[in-house]
Each structure stands twice: as C-alpha cells, then as structure tokens.
Amino acid sequence: MYPAPPIGDHSDVESESIRVTRSVVVPRSEIELRFSRSSGPGGQHAQKTESRVEAVFDVEGSSALTETQKRRVVTRAGPVLRAVAQDERSQWRNRELATNRLVDQLREALKVPRRRKATKPSTQARERRLEAKRRRAQVKRMRKPPTD
C-alpha cells in the first residue's frame, strides 16, 4: 500500500491529518486506501495500472471521534464508510477524489439536525385561508341547479 497524498494545504500538519469539521480532525493513518484496476474500457493503460482507489474509514475504531459522534455516524451512515474513485487515469488524482468523497460522507453524517420550532399561522394567514374556502364554496354553490 502506498502513502496517501496530501490534500489541500501541504503543511506538515495537513499531510498527516484531514480537517472534517471545526472540531473533528481525522489522521490519514485511519483512512485505509485500497487499489485495484479500474473497470470498463480503457485499453492497455486500464488493464495494467491499478488506478481505482477505495478509501475505507472504520468509524468505531477511530480515535478522532467522540463516542457521541461515533453513534451519530453509525446510525446515519453505518459502521464503515467507503468511497470509490475511478474517474481519472491517475491513481494520485483518484486518491484525492476518494478521500474527499469519504470526508464529505463523514461531514454529512456528523451534521446535527436543527430542532424544529413549533409555529402558528398568523392571523392574516388564517383569514386568507378561510376567505379562499368561502370563495371556493360559493363557486360550487353557483354550479348547482336552482331550487324551486
């Protein structure tokens, strides 16, 4: 297995870890990269090079996440996150794509849903609704044949 390339800023801290959110930084060592041959047509290049990259992140075995964060990610995305990239000819570029996709999945799973505030319709909204109902009832009444 090859070492993962740095994504974004090439400083020492960035090359060893990836910032997912403000409070979560995942070490690159926790993201396992697997390489294989890309599927589909491509001639000799695709048949000889292992340019397909699968990035795997074990949520429960991670030291970067708290227990609460782990529970949230496992319930939303599962115990293991996977991202595959075989879009490019270059394994280097596919590594970046797979890692970015994995980080995006983790970021989505970590989002805390906002609580819904119960609201009431305004007085004017209620009046508009009732007025529309009255108009509709009037239209339907006009369609009936007259009574003797």
Image: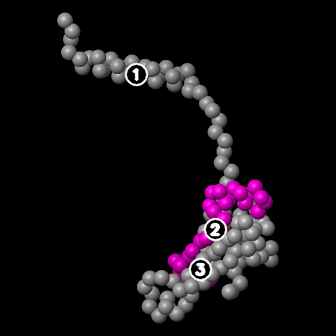
- Which residue has dot 2 on it? 81
Question: Which of these two is toward me, 104 or 90?
Answer: 104
- Which residue has dot 1 on it? 133
Q: SS for tag 3? A: strand
Residue 123, image x, y percentages: 55, 21
Q: Residue most toward the top?
A: 148
Residue 45, image x, y percentages: 50, 91
Q: Which mark is residue 53?
A: 3
Compared with 39, 25 (above or below) is above
Question: Which of these two is toward me, 104 or 11?
Answer: 104
Mark 1, other Cα within 10 Å: few <14 / some 14–19 / many ≥20:
few
Compared with 104, 35 (above or below) is below
Compared with 123, 110 (above or below) is below
Residue 134 highlighted magenta (yes or no)? no
Find the distance from the CA under tag 2 to the CA under tag 3: 14 Å
Contact? badges 2 and 1 (CB < 8 Å) = no
Q: SS for tag 2? A: strand
The answer, for residue 43, to whether it is visible in the render is yes
Residue at horizontal 67 percent and vertical 59 percent from the top: 73
Q: Amino acid at mark 2?
A: Leu
Compared with 134, 78 (above or below) is below
Residue at horizontal 79 percent and vertical 67 percent from the top: 63
